[in-house]
Amino acid sequence: MAFGIEADLILHNGRIWCGREEGISNAVAVWQGKVLATGTNAEIMGLKGPRTETIDLEGRFASPGLIDNHLHLIATGIVMGWVDATPAAAPTLAVLMEKLAERAAKTPKGGWVRARGYDQVKLDIGRHPTREELDSAVPDHPVLLTRACGHVAIANSRALELAGVTEVTPVPEGGVIGLTDGKLNGFLAENAQNLLKAAMPPATTEELIAGIERAGKYLLSFGITSCMDAAVGQIAGLAEIQAYEMAKLAGRLPVRVWLTLLGDPGVSIVEDCWRAGLISGAGDDMLRVGGVKIFLDGSAGGRTAWMSSPYEGEPDNIGVQMLPDAQVQDIVKSCHDRGYQMACHAIGDGAIEQLITAYEKALAANPDPDRRHRVEHCGYSTPDQNARMQAAGILPAPQMAFIHDFGDSYISVLGEERGMQSYPIGTWARMGLRPSTGSDSPVCSPDPFPNLYAMITRQTGKGTLMDASERLSREEALQAFTEYGAYSQKAEAVKGRLVPGQWADIAVFDNDLLTAPPETILSGTRCLLTLLAGRVVHDARG
């Protein structure tokens, strides 16, 4: 027998995309959770022994397990229990208010009613709901309705009362409290949302673990085997680290997770993690400490991303700058000097400029050519900023699902010229910047198929074509979702391709992602089988 080793598992008779350089194989052999070999059916079946399990793929397409480069795993799991306010579920204000009222009727007196997912551009009213509208639907329970992006929320009067927010409440730095004719309209953006959070009951450890488990299983149903939790500490502080470790020990961690530590002033968990030895790279391939995250601006669709020029129709609005330059540079340098990789939120070109400058200064003072600091989202980088990222080894980490879900909103708030150029992943790929991709769930669904569709077509969900020059080939799109996702975590040696020695994380689909019409990838594709370390963890085969 070749290798002198009997495979534990063989998947055969398929079209297995092993990686952009490796191409297609018919079969893959797994031993001790890792890829032993790939090749033709005949070659790989030569590794079959009396105890080898086999799976006949029946000609189906398989790929390395997908890697979502940026989402909020605990939040995704928790939000799955909230009112679904997405445009698909609540396309009109009336439907949205009806859903909130229905949830309130089932909620104990005084309990919070939470909802997430609306986009004011897609609502029939074409604007944010108001405090008065929420009051009309739910007068006796506190309500917080969060926009899809997570950077904007609307509160009803009961919620504002519980939080002690009035017309004279000081506006937190990096926040917005909305007023209409001098009265609270319920609108809260960025750091102002923390005023409401302080009035809510904290999540219990069991709720955190349940969120991890629920969301992780959901990811597996899409063929996603790895993800980055993009702001660990945002919900429950350091208790989230404990919850992850407990979930892992209890067998309730379904996917590989790269933990990004919240580093924003006042809520940072970095100091506690540093004292505990939780530095970038600590952990194992199931649960590893990744980067440090600070927020530099908001969201483009919410008109809070920090731009160098104003939003359409709002000549005085260039978004929200969350932190002064000197503070950003101090935080970045401190974390960099301690050995942390950085993965900071910057969408507008103003925020990207601030962040790249901070990275450049930290790298100049303490060189590390392979630190791989990341710009999370990186929606509106300029050609000069792209060149500086290339020179410094800085990685753009976009979520191309945004093009599908929010592309038309970007055009609406930024104008056609700027909006069309959102998230220029084709440019980054051509420059060798190894762009990865993800969903930012629960901002967007972790469903990978709109993401793939957007990368290969540059079309929004409404069909608007956004700068065709930024399209990726099928292979490039899959590479962004696998190999480059691993690279962004410094994990390209252990996952992201199906090559000997890497983890046998495999996704099997009922549609050929390399040849199928884009429309069927978007709306007609299912993940049939997901394997993590050679073990079947999701099986939807009839």
Image (cartoon, rainbow, N blue to C red):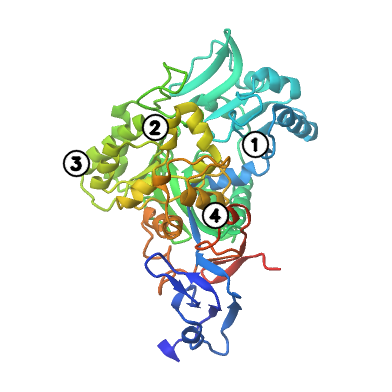
Q: Which amino acid does label 1 sit on?
A: Pro
Q: What residue type is labelled 2?
A: Gly
Q: Position of residue 139 (x, y in %)?
A: 75, 21
Q: Distance between the residues labelled 3 and 4?
A: 47 Å
Which residue, given by chain and number where applicable, does mark 4 sit on?
A: 518
Q: Is mark 4 on a helix, strand or loop?
A: helix
Which one is closest to the eye, mark 1 or mark 4?
4
Which residue, given by chain and number where applicable, does mark 2 sit on?
A: 348
Q: From the viewer's side, name the closer residue of 356 and 383.
A: 383
Residue 166, quarter of the rendered image = top right
In the rendered image, the vertical position of residue 329 relative to residue 170, given as above or below: below
Q: Position of residue 191 (x, y in %)?
A: 48, 26
Placement of the C terminus among the 4 image quadrants? bottom right
Q: How far apart are marks 1 and 4 (CA)?
A: 22 Å
- Tell me which numbered mark, 1 or 3, is placed earlier along the sequence: 1
Which one is closest to the eye, mark 3 or mark 4?
4
- Tell me which numbered mark, 2 or 4, is placed earlier along the sequence: 2
Q: Say few, some or many: other residues with alpha carbon within 10 Å of mark 1 (under 14 / 14 to 19 / 20 or more).
A: some
Q: Distance between the residues labelled 2 and 1?
A: 25 Å
The reply to whether the C-beta atoms of the residues labelled 2 and 3 are less than 8 Å apart is no
Q: Residue at x 56, y 60 (%)?
A: 223
Q: Distance between the residues labelled 2 and 3?
A: 26 Å
Q: Say few, some or many: other residues with alpha carbon within 10 Å of mark 4 (under 14 / 14 to 19 / 20 or more).
A: some
Q: What element carries label 2?
A: loop
The reply to whether the C-beta atoms of the residues labelled 1 and 3 are less than 8 Å apart is no
Q: Residue 365: which numbered mark, if any? A: 3
Q: Is mark 3 on a helix, strand or loop?
A: helix
Which one is closest to the eye, mark 2 or mark 4?
4
Which residue, given by chain and number where applicable, does mark 1 sit on?
A: 87
Left or right: where does residue 224 sit relative to residue 489?
right
Q: What residue type is labelled 4?
A: Pro
